[in-house]
Image (spheres, coloured by chain):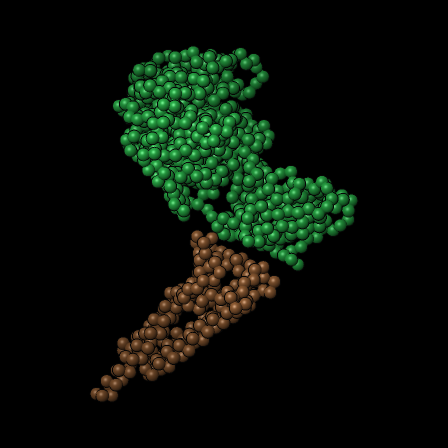
Amino acid sequence: MFMMGCGNNGNKTQEKAGALGSNAAEKVYVAPGEHDEFYAFLSGGYSGNVTVYGLPSGRMLKEIPVFSQFPTSGYGYSEETKPMLNTSHGFIPWDDSHHPDISQTNGELDGRFIFINGNNTPRIAKIDLSVFETTEIIEIPNSAGNHSSSFVTENTEYVVAGTRFSVPVPQVDMPINEYKGKFKGALSFISVDPEHGHMDLKFQIIMPGFNYDLSHPGRGNSHGWFFFSTYNTEEASTLLEVNASQNDKDFIAAINWKKIEEYVNNGGGKKMPANYAHNVYDESTHNATSTMKKEVLVVDPTEVPGAVYLLPTPKSPHGCDVSPDGEYIIGSGKLSADLTVHSFTNMLKAIEDKKFDGEAYGIPIMNYDDVVAGVVKSGGLGPLHTEFDAKGNAYTTFFISSEVVKWKLGTWEVIDRKPTYYSVGHLMVPGGNSRKPFGKYLIAMNKITKDRYLPTGPELEHSVQLYDISGEKMELLSDFPSHGEPHYAAGCPADLLKPKSKKFYKMEENKHPYAIKAPQDAKVVREGSNVHIYMSTIRSHFTPDNIEGIKVGDNVYFHITNHEQDFDVPHGFAMIGANTSEILVMPGQTKTITWQPKQVGVWPFYCTDFCSALHQEMQGYIRVSPQNSDIKLSWSLDGE
Amino acid sequence: MKKHKILMMVGSLLLLLLFAFPLWNITLEAPQYPTPLGMDIYINKFEDMHPHDIKNINLMNHYVGMKYIPETIPEFKIFPVVIAVMVILGVFIGLKANYKWYLIWFILMLVLGIAGMYDFYLWEYNYGHDLDPKAIMKFTNPDGSIMGFQPPLFGSKDILNFKAHSYPRLGAYGMFFGMFLTFIAYLLGKKEAKKVKSN
């Protein structure tokens, strides 16, 4: 009960009176035809997706499937997108998506890509913000519970993937109680091609077997460093609730990735056999390919002196957030009441003076007192995550006491606190993980909804709360539900996305191997028991629409090319009895779905996306004959 | 060189703008097209205002049985020749001929222009009235006659859910201004001739 957060009721009535007395409704109103000022990308947690919300309206604008099959569009069902979900364990149509982060240039959001981690089967995905579609997924070997991920460096040089669970590296059949000293934690640095955004696992740092919880990049002076919070520095392997909570202090690991990059570029590190999938969606062929990579470069941190340090931080720190100027690293002990703020300058000074307090597996441990810049005595319970505004203020969520606390960087004084409903996890200020936060709004993502909507029991969509943080005091503006269990979010001004937005795919650029360039090229081709239907859609008909000569036991491939070239005119395609999903084909795109007819008869297909006044007429039939039938393939073209 | 001769030549040379800029434009506005659909008409081609506009106009128009806007029409062969001849003729007249020829050139151009507009009207009429009898949607006027979908020759007009705009573009303005200059050239030439006489 304690952990679920109580004691809200007193505050709640107060808050309501406050909100009623203000013009909160006006502040979240976005008039018809106008755009929201900010776009927020919320991780969907166990839904495996990302949802796009407008701020301040709180309207959900799109659901982007990332690690999940998504029948709405056919993602993960269509032949083209199935390879996106390939892993070394085979096809995995689900994951637990946690921390989205928008690409940066010079420490500021550039609106090109969003990266997000798959927590369960370690993966990092890239979403292209010109189309709001997942275009790349890379699996992370030697890793498990990819949690301290996926944050980007100042120029998107790297996306990181830190393992929450340490595991044997390489994997081996061994007793679990020999965990201590034998299990390892891999911190992966995935380089991002500046031009195309293509990801490549450049190196992995093989760290001691702690649990790596969250991370953030340095910026400004601390650019070139990455900070990871850890728990279970006890290296316990049973009943972690107790056994991983024994040490008074765990660590924030400070990694000088530039130093390691240099070491690697000079031939350092060791190539190690691995097996992981790299899945890339090509926007011109409209096809994803999955390549299995067989090798990974691993780095032993003790072989790169001066690259890794451990900063003691009380107690089981969760959040690990870096201030916009890169000076402060905020560690929130989720079992502590206080926030510990480390100073990057102090850390460098202590390193220079070689002032250490021992080592762990050869990695120097700093003196707590040498690196701490200050402590925020908040009186809240269970601090988790911190974001920033542009005026030198920080905002921290407190899970147990269910609140957001505003405090000042440098003086560490608490300025304001507001309740959340209920049990808040992450919070997000657009640009909060960059040099330039847009400190107008803050959203708090709650783990529990309770009575914010009709108190319909076992599970409600979780609740997000929007605060106006432009003034000295925070003001709660609205609630809106989110999908799945949102963990972190990333947000940016809509104006950053608008110039890059793609309205449709150009037909002349469609290089899909089964695309047809015009409806008159439609055809049906039999290759043994495989039948390929090259089909065109345009308002409001399929070409061809009636097909005969299909037999029970055939493998029918519908290759649908949408010949529209207009803003937002997808056509859908659904076949009765197909053991997949529909597909939604965007203008200029080709998608393929399969069907294995099992029963003779005449079976209809139709368009699933309302496309015009004659949408209902957009349909056709397939005649299915017995396997031994000699009915020739035939089809009708545009009424002929 | 005399001012009226220069004006005559510049005036006729302005017709050359027609080779680079559109003559006319038809734009269709409707709520479901946040960016309106539009077509620029040159002396030798139709062109999309935004990529794929003509394709989208065709797609939309087929519901009421209108024909697809053709890739090319015979006029696209004739118009450039006519304009080229008129430019050469105009420059030649400016250089060599008596001011009275300016007026003849002007009247000839006016006649050709009117003929061109009339041809455009016929084309629009045919495009808007020669409907496929199997059209998906059939609309009738209040008097029971079959509704046409002819865009306006000049100006703006409501056609079902669309507002159609039909206006000249830079090429046409160049031509109008050029013709105006040749007429001024004629008046100047005439004035000068009078002066010479009275002297």
In this view, A391 is above or below B58: above
Q: Position of residue B60 (x, y in %)?
A: 52, 58
Q: Furthest-left residue in view? A: B199
Q: Is residue A239 left or right of residue A317?
A: right
Q: Furthest-bottom residue in view? A: B198
Q: Position of residue A491 (x, y in %)?
A: 40, 36
Residue at the location (33% across, 15% down)? A368
**For the N terminus of chain A, which image quadrant?**
top left
Residue at the location (43% across, 13% down)? A245
**For the C terminus of chain A, which image quadrant?**
bottom right
Q: Is residue B164 left or right of residue A626?
A: left
Can residue A81 be spotted in the picture? no
Q: Which chain is brown?
A: B
Q: Which chain is green?
A: A
In this view, A106 is above or below B147: above
In this view, B112 is above or below A208: below
Q: Is residue A579 left or right of residue A200?
A: right
Q: Position of residue A346 (x, y in %)?
A: 29, 21
Residue at the location (59% across, 42% down)? A582
Viewer-nearest residue: A320 or A60? A60
Can residue A596 be spotted in the picture? yes
Viewer-nearest residue: A77 or A441? A441
| Label tally | 0
Q: Position of residue A251 (x, y in %)?
A: 39, 18
Residue at the location (44% across, 22% down)? A213
Q: Is residue A566 left or right of residue B198?
A: right
